[in-house]
Amino acid sequence: MKKVLSLFLILFVILVSCTKENIQEGLAVLDEEEGDRLELDPQLFPFNTLSSYRFFKGQLALQRPVKGVLPYTPINALFSDYAHKLRFVWMPAGTSATYTSDHDVLDFPDGTVLIKSFYYDRVQPADVRRILETRLLFKRNGAWEFANYVWNAEQTEATLDMGGSHTPITWVDESGLTRTVTYRIPSQAECFTCHKFDGVATPIGPKPQNMNSDLAYSNSSTTAQRRPQNQLQRWVQEGYLQPGYPKRISTVARWDDPSEELTDRIRGYVDINCAHCHREGSHCDYRPMRFAFNETADPVNLGVCVPPDDPLLPQHTFIVARGNTARSLLHYRAASVDEAERMPLLGRTLVHDEGLALISDWINSLSPACP
């Protein structure tokens, strides 16, 4: 009897361990199994629940995409209070996106759905992964629309909610530090503030310059079986991108890669965190900075030695003062959590410590001092 109990205990431990591993690994698994491809009618969107779309197989929280739902990962991602993100794309059969330019969002066909789930690992007190929201951006009749889904505590379903809400979260970060945030799930109006361009909604991240990188695709939860492949090439292979885009793409530098040149890293950072507002036709187009990667080869567009129109404090004599963070308004706003002063205005309530350190290092590396 003792041997039977011992064997049962061992099997139970193995089963639990495998389940935990599958939960972790399953979040990046691409379903390559045979079967019918997912088909949907975008004219019926939005559904009341996330599960109604049938984007994922098995337990919804595992986020294992079905055939036709393709995971992707941009080189640089917008900071969102340290939340992790999972991204997927679905398009109707027989349709594909087209290349416009390196720095423009791909021209997606009607019916496209961009799926993004926000989650934290090691959420306390249970020390588990928790998905907070899944945002959909779908294109219908030539226009992009929003649908936001808030997850229940049981992690079994997410329900359509466009009103915006707050969720307190305490988690242990990758360095072992316990952090707390009142996470903001945006309202429809807040979504539009960040995504608007010339008065209409648009995606932010899926640009060739931010997608020209490898992603490990797999049909297994075993890491060793994953196969790295360029994402743009994979989109062509899946029929989600028309072939013929340029072989050489001006690709953004990964902001957190110390092997990249410091100025290129800062250009990559502000491109994804700031450029969607600081461009013509967007929310902050009245400001002098233009933070898109294709525009910041000119340091003036980064605000270097450019006087601010709203200094906030007398010592902020420049948006970026060479060699002096105390005189740089960019540094001040990145270090602030005040709703009236922080940048970006929406999408974060915490200071991005690593991003602020990058900004500091870059400013301190500049010389000579601004006149």
Image: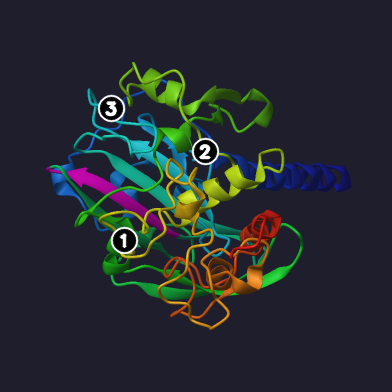
| Pointer 1 local density, CA inside 10 Å: few below 14, some 14–19, many at least 20 | some
Q: Nearer the viewer, residue 241 or 283?
A: 283
Which residue is at the far right?
Answer: 2
Query: Residue 126: x and y, percent?
Result: 66, 67
**Residue where numbered disc 2 is placed:** 252
Amino acid type, label 1 = Asp
Foreground mark, 1 or 3? Answer: 1
Residue drawn 55% across the image and 28% down it: 214
Say what secondary structure mark 3 lies in.
Answer: loop
Q: Which mark is residue 210?
A: none
Identify the magenta region: 133-141
Query: Residue 27: x and y, percent?
Result: 54, 43
**In magenta stretch: residue 146:** no
Query: Residue 302: x and y, percent?
Result: 49, 55
Vertical placement of residue 352 versus 105, above or below: below
Q: Which mark is residue 98?
A: 3
- C-alpha separation, residue under disc 1 versus residue under disc 3: 27 Å
Amino acid type, label 2 = Val
Which residue is at the far bottom?
Answer: 314
* Number of numbered discs overlaid on the protein picture: 3
**Residue where numbered disc 1 is placed:** 285
Say what secondary structure mark 1 lies in.
Answer: loop
| Pointer 3 local density, CA inside 10 Å: few below 14, some 14–19, many at least 20 | some
Answer yes or no: is residue 125 visible: no
Query: Residue 296: x and y, percent?
Result: 47, 46
Residue drawn 47% across the image and 28% down it: 231
Please identify the quarter of the rendering in which residue 33 is found.
top left
Answer yes or no: is residue 164 visible: yes
Vertical placement of residue 120 versus 316, above or below: above
Q: Earlier in the sequence, mark 1 or mark 3?
A: 3
Left or right position of 348 against 18? left
Vertical placement of residue 317 versus 120, above or below: below
